[in-house]
């Protein structure tokens, strides 16, 4: 361990892409201030990359020789006794997991922004950190530059968090904002996002909700004190959202957002099981205009938290991007380094595995949009299908009545997913119904 | 110090008003959960109050005898060796300051929600806590139930925070929301706020901006790493805001909010002083509709932070209220108790006294509203006064031209307060100008 006189923390950086590169620059720029305010300064001593030639032009931290700093051998960094602190920005589960475990075992605190890793094997890593008495910090893994991990880990320790609703994927929020504000259809908005570098060439992880789901699993684990993993999350993506859904939402003073929703439910009665249940779902939803989440535009992110005592809270900011994410990583590095110098750390609370409530048993309001034959009696038949499944209708709208085809839209009161599936099946079987175009969940104001 | 086997933390509570009463209930309700998740439970062993008879009906924590718990002798609580942790909710500087210093000196961690105290003598208390190696935590003192202290103290350690703009007073935001949405005038909206218990009978601390200023001083100290005290803050209240100002703001797609603004400025060139400067100001300002702060309604609060690397962030929630504030206090209690059991603590970073930039040297855009004689040449004369002081006009609006009196409104580009004061003096001297009704600052989008 460095003496108090030696304020330099030797950093091993694993991965030097978009965020890693921004981090190296940010450290160079901020080191003086950081040393003045926190009494530590960072020396990025070694950097592991996949392809050395790709980094020939990367500015070498601290004016060292390129070949002394960059290596493809990440193991040699985590096993280097001269390295004090490891920053993991490789992404993915392996080899990140093994490298972090090795770092922690040798007493090096770890800072990571790897949501996929933590959403899958977070519990293992948190336990390893606690066993070694060092920090594993991950502010950047939950909502990028938005400080949400510390509020959840510390400030809200006394709070009974009921629900977290997050817009935690900038790509999909950018696409949905374009569709809403410019009337673009999904394909055009996605193409623009790709052109601007907001969406990857293969946009699956973003548009299908896997990225948002991983973040929701991490936040749910912290908020509810039980282990939630990526595989527990129910996903629906935004590819099916149409310009007509957005226009309908607008007429009803709603906007469509991809929401990651984590909820805590009281134990089911008569189940003989007194554990509470957790539901974690990602889906496009209609959000009322007056809801704080409705005004989160473009690639901004926000996390809306409902607590029993604290009431409603929202955390808003940049969910991604090299420099914003690097800022969150640097904050963690300072925290980890000062703790390490004081021989202390903050263990991540470790609960049991969560009892997951299946999506079928989660209640929400719905929006349905369908084409029907334009004749009398159709509305009664559709309404009857809702009623037969115990779902009551909040409002209804008919468009494009051409004499042949009518377009019907419904907003319902809350119903269980299971009820809605039965209703959809019943409506689909009606001879007068041509096609159900969209089924979206609705956030109640 | 309690052994690991003994998870009970004996709490001495100083003050049992609105927040203290809610805290006692919240602890009773949440103790089981807290013990399960954090390994500590709280026993509110003793409570100091001013008037014993007022608390005859207060439920006694833990089923003890009333007279064993309640006392008017607060000193006896902080000096009681059986008390592990002190929670201060008395408010004001003395006797809170002395009681907290005594608690810290005897090794008891302290949780406080006392903004007035911290904005005046925070540095003394933080130093005393560090000297004793225990925590002083104060999440509830900056923005009530909104977790903003930990993000500032920890998550944003690596960030170069440029500006903080907060709506941090619920009373004034409620009044301004009523004026905006219902066209109420200031006196009627204040009366309604008083009737609902949102405003005190003497509303000075809220409507004149002192409450918001104290919170801004605390946040500025944390964000900029220098000591800012309540006396450094420049205040203007909302009593002068008129229905006509609000109507004008609306026509220009703005809303009027009471903002607490803390800014960091680079050292003035040629000053021979390399210290950066800090400006902390509270005033009613016009906020563009598309700004995230514009949609913060009623008694909700929000803190908007602009960082060099992290970009824009906003933290939104309940800034006051018994139960929400108690939730923030309980979060701090858990944190302080777990740290204390692990013999660790987190010192509040201590910078030097801030170099304060006087308001005259702070730039902002302005809105002016005035009555003039309705004759040709008046506009040219007024515009000339702006030009003579180097201020350029962004937009102008003329209302109620009666043939005798005209009402003129101006939005300017940014100017220094000093320039604006000279301009106002020059305009006031124009014979054609009857009265300058309002001068408000404008947040640029």
Image (tube, coloured by chain):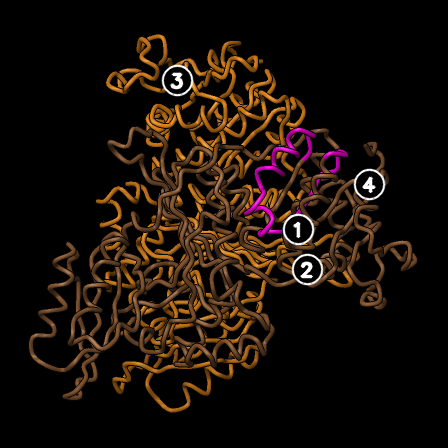
Chain colours: A orange, B brown
How packed mark 3 is, by other alpha carbons closer than 10 Å (few <14, some 14-19, many 20 or more), is many
Q: Main secondary structure of the magenta part?
A: helix
Q: Is residue A420 visible?
A: yes
Query: Label for residue B19?
Result: 2
Residue nearer the viewer, B443 or B232:
B232
Point out the image quarter for the C terminus of chain B.
bottom left
Q: Residues within 10 Å of mark 2 (few under 14, many from 20)?
A: many
Q: CA distance from mark 4 to mark 3?
A: 54 Å
Q: Which mark is residue A47?
A: 3
Distance CA(mark 4)–CA(mark 1): 22 Å
Q: Is residue A171 left or right of residue A367?
A: left
Residue range in magenta is B105-134
For the point 72% across and 41% down, which residue is it? B38
Choose the circle earlier in sequence order: 4 or 1: 4
User: Which is closer to the viewer, label 3 or label 2?
Assistant: 2
Where is residue A87? Give x, y as percent.
Answer: 46, 25
Residue denoted by label 4: B79
Which of the 4 quarters of the picture holds residue B39? top right
Q: Earlier in the sequence, mark 4 or mark 2?
A: 2
């Amino acid at each position: 361990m460095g003496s108090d006189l030696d304020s330099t923390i030797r950093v091993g950086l694993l991965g030097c892409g978009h965020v890693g590169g921004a981090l190296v620059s940010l450290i160079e720029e901020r080191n003086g201030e950081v040393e003045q305010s926190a009494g530590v300064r960072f020396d990025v001593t070694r950097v592991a990359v996949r392809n050395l030639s790709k980094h020939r032009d990367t500015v070498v931290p601290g004016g060292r020789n390129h070949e002394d700093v960059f290596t493809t051998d990440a193991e040699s960094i985590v096993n280097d006794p001269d390295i004090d602190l490891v920053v993991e920005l490789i992404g993915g589960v392996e080899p990140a997991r093994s490298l972090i475990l090795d770092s922690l075992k040798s007493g090096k605190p770890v800072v990571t922004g790897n949501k996929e890793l933590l959403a899958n094997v977070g519990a293992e890593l948190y336990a390893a950190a606690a066993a070694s008495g060092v920090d594993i910090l991950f502010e950047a893994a939950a909502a990028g530059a938005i400080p949400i991990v510390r509020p959840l880990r510390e400030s809200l320790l006394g709070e009974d968090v009921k629900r977290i609703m997050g817009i935690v994927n900038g790509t999909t929020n950018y696409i949905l904002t374009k569709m809403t504000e410019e009337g673009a259809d999904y394909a055009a908005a996605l193409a623009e996002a790709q052109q601007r570098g907001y969406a990857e060439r293969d946009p699956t992880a973003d548009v299908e909700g896997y990225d948002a789901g991983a973040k929701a699993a991490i936040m749910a684990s912290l908020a509810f004190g039980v282990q939630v993993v990526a595989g527990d999350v129910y996903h629906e993506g935004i590819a099916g959202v149409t310009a007509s859904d957005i226009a309908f939402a607008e007429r009803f003073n709603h906007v469509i957002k991809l929401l990651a929703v984590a909820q805590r439910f009281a134990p089911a009665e008569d189940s003989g099981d007194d554990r509470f249940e957790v539901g974690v779902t990602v889906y496009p939803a209609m959000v009322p205009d007056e809801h704080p989440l409705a005004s989160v535009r473009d690639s901004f992110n926000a996390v809306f938290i409902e607590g029993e005592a604290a009431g409603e809270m929202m955390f808003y900011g940049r969910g991604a991007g090299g420099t914003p994410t690097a800022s969150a990583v640097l904050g963690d590095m300072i925290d980890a380094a000062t703790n390490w110098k004081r021989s202390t750390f903050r263990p991540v609370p470790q609960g049991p595995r969560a009892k997951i409530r299946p999506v079928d048993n989660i209640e929400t309001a719905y929006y349905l949009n369908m084409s029907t034959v334009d004749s009398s009696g159709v509305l009664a038949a559709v309404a009857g299908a809702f009623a037969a499944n115990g779902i009551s209708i909040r409002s209804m709208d008919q468009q494009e009545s051409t004499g042949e085809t009518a377009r019907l839209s419904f907003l319902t009161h809350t119903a269980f997913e299971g009820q809605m599936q039965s209703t959809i099946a019943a409506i689909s079987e009606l001879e007068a119904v041509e096609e159900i175009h969209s089924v979206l969940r609705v956030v109640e104001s």
